Image: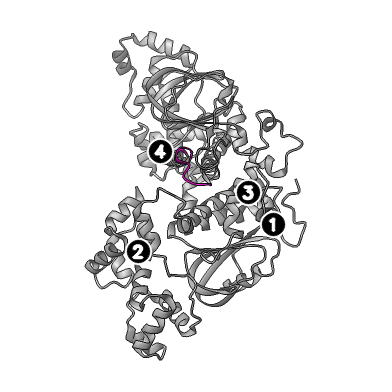
Amino acid sequence: MNRFKVTQEYPDVQVISQTGSSEIFSVIGRINERFKLVLVEDGTGVLNIGECQETFIAPAIFCFDELEKPKLIRSINLSVRLLYFHPRVINSSYSFELLRNIDGITDFTIRSNRQLLRPFFDKSPEYIGLLNMNGVNGKSVAYLLNAIQGEITNQNYTYIRTVLFELLILIQKIYYEYFGKEKINQTSTMEQSATNLFDGMGSQIHDSDDDIKEIINYLNANFRRKITLDELSKLFYLNRMTLNQRFAKATGMSVKHYLTKLRIRTASFLLQNPEFCISDIPEHLGFYDSAHFYRIFRKYTGCSPSDYQRRYCV
Amino acid sequence: MYYKTVGRNFHPGFELPIWYNPCEEFTFQGTDLGLRLILIKEGAGILNMEAGRVPVIAPCVLCLNETETVKLEQNQGLKARAFYFHPSYINSHFSFENIRLDANDFLETDRQDAYWLRSFILRDPKFPYGLLEIGHSVAERISKLFDKLNEQLEHQGDYYWPCRSRSFFLEILFLLDRIYSVIIADQNINTPEAIKNPHPIVLYLYMNYKEDITIAKLSKCFRINRTTMSKSFKEATSSSIIEYLIKLRIRLACLLLRDTTIPVTEVAERVGFNNLTHFGRTFSKYLGCSPSEYHRKYCWLLNKIS
């Protein structure tokens, strides 16, 4: 029964949530031989992972393998938590090498548990470890992290492992929702349209335009109130035209379009909660009035807010 | 030969040791059924098992192993569906023998995986039949997971259908394990007592516990003289009719307090108590704590919501 003992520098499963948020990101690079999961509970930031730069907004999670050393470039009101674990917790025969190369292994358990770990080690230009989520999933991840953290002191490892499985299954679902669209043949059109709202958001900004990254950060942090182009132009010392052009070049869309997407995306997350009152949304999210919100929402998702809530919350 | 699902387009010929039975009627018998996870969605009935005769009411789940057989003796619109599976579906090292033995050649994680099957394997006085009574919300979640799991087995939409089906199945197991651990930690009240013969009034009580039931009404309804009725009921169940009814109501109240966030006043009403003080007193008599204390202690939804 020594599977979970602290035999090396780091225990096999650990959750960290007290330390400052920027510190947590710097700790990740120092923890070797563990997969890491970061839950972004609040705020927004920009992260460097290898060659890529990623803007993220809560709620979201990052999955890192044992080698990645992310660097936090800047952040606003950030609150994050870290879970790290060795894959042998999931299956005693797992090593990092085995997970990356299972050619010739036919064992069903080894292969199917490996599927649950893929978000951590199987990266691509489309998926560099960031998973955006809705608020309900964000709360579920936080709940499961709490459960693990609570039992670490009690050393109830069988239970910890079960909760870790629950967490991995949840992450796998979120992962497939955004990156396995073509693989799941029965996705409804509504889910697809909600997923499309993510396109171009939080993904890499191809151009290394620092001003624009700054502006995106600002939008991500302030989109809940009304923001005008004039305001941005004054704040960032850029002429309106130039600002919009450079923004479009970096993100593939206008400032207004980006803001609207951000708001509709947040609205769609809020509406996945059956108890959320639709009439609260317009003023919460910087829409002029409810008619405006209804019109825009329908345009982006193909259904009215109330239909969306009903269909999601059945 | 055990039940299994065979791969078609993806992994053709591959045999996944799980099989879906959309309409479980308890007519299959024999030891080759393997482990069975049965969700009873509607109705009520009396099941005859080796461990005894037990009345069941929807929603509930039966976790059966390959040595157990079940006969449906009385049926009041019982609707059930089931998954039959071999333990190797959970872990390829597993056989019916070694999951009971804690085998020496098990890896640490095999031992931990085997733990997830305990509600199918372990039997004791607190958990004699493999029966888990569940709340409606849990039943709804399990039912949805049944649908998703079945969809994977039936459509086999991509390369990952066997893995994905297994992760849905694990989710069901985790949910059941949580309920199982509350039941075995709790007083015996959460286990329905076996009955000697399938007395018709037992099932009547299960179907009508919400109503105002009196001996006089029952005697009229079944057209039996009160003394004969009480005597035959006591022979069948070893309790008096009213005692049996109260225990049933308290057990169902526990279930609502455990699996929902329905307020105590409504719980009392739903299980047929029309006086809240009386409900509170009776509840503490059996459980040793008040309904709200029980709710705070065992309701696993509470942590999730706050």
Nearer the viewer's eye, disc 1 or disc 3? 1
| Secondary structure of residue under mark 1 | helix
Which label number is shown at residue B101? none
- Chain letter of disc 2? A
Alpha-carbon distance for marks 1 and 2? 40 Å
Question: Which residue shows up at 61% across the image and 33% down it?
Answer: B87
Q: Are the residues under badges 2 and 4 in a single subunit?
A: no
Q: Position of residue A266 (x, y in %)?
A: 38, 65
Residue pointed to by mark 1: A96
Do the residues at discs 4 and 1 belong to one chain? no
Badge 1 density bin: few <14, some 14–19, many ≥20, Cα 10 Å? some
* Mark number displayed over residue A267: 2
Which region of the structure is painted magenta? B150-159
Alpha-carbon distance for marks 3 and 2?
A: 34 Å
Query: Which quadrant of the figure has residue A197?
Result: bottom left
Q: Which residue is mark 3?
A: A161
Q: Residues within 10 Å of mark 3 (few under 14, many from 20)?
A: some
Label 4 crowd (10 A; few <14 / some 14-19 / many >=20): some
Labels 1 and 3 share a subunit: yes
Report the Cα–Cα distance between label 4 and label 3.
Answer: 27 Å
Residue pictured at 31% horizontal, 26% vertical? B212
The kind of residue tagged 1 is Phe
Evaluate if marks 3 and 2 touch, with contact meaning CB atoms under 8 Å apart.
no
| Residue B122 falls in image quadrant | top right
Question: Which numbered mark, 4 or 1, is in the foreground of this view?
Answer: 1
